[in-house]
Image (tube, rainbow, N blue to C red):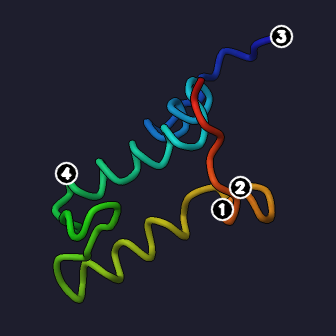
Amino acid sequence: MSDGTAVRLEPHEIALLGEGPRAAVTVAVVELHLRGLVEADLPGTIRARAADGVEAVRRLLLSRPRCAPGCASRPPPRAS
């Protein structure tokens, strides 16, 4: 039953529910890029733009829900 209140999901939460963890990370990285906090570096990597950007990225990542223990160390499943 609904009590009439709505919960607004963040874009990365919507991506996680719809397409999974890989999509959620992609959305989070795009968000950081659009905020001007990171830029592309070597293939598969990003770099913080400034010292204050490093702290902002750290705060943003620490504010996100965490995955189950060990999920970050496992490679994502391959799409068929």
Quarter of the image for the C terminus: give it. top right
Q: Secondary structure at mark 3?
A: loop
Q: Nearer the viewer, residue 14 or 68?
A: 68
Please name the residue shown 37% across and 72% down the image.
Answer: 57
- Disc 2 residue crowd, few under 14, some 14–19, many 20+, Cα 10 Å: few
Residue 73, how many percent across, how many down?
Answer: 68, 66
Residue 28, how many percent across, how many down?
Answer: 40, 50
Residue 11, how many percent across, how many down?
Answer: 43, 36
**Viewer-nearest of labels 3 and 1?**
1
Give the number of the disc on residue 67: 2
Left or right: residue 64 versus residue 52 is right
User: What amino acid is at disc 2?
Assistant: Cys
Name the residue tied to disc 3.
1
Q: Secondary structure at mark 2?
A: loop
| First in sequence: mark 3 vs mark 1 | 3
Residue extending furthest toward the front: 80
| First in sequence: mark 2 vs mark 1 | 2
Name the residue tied to disc 4.
34
Q: In this rendering, is residue 18 above or below 27?
A: above
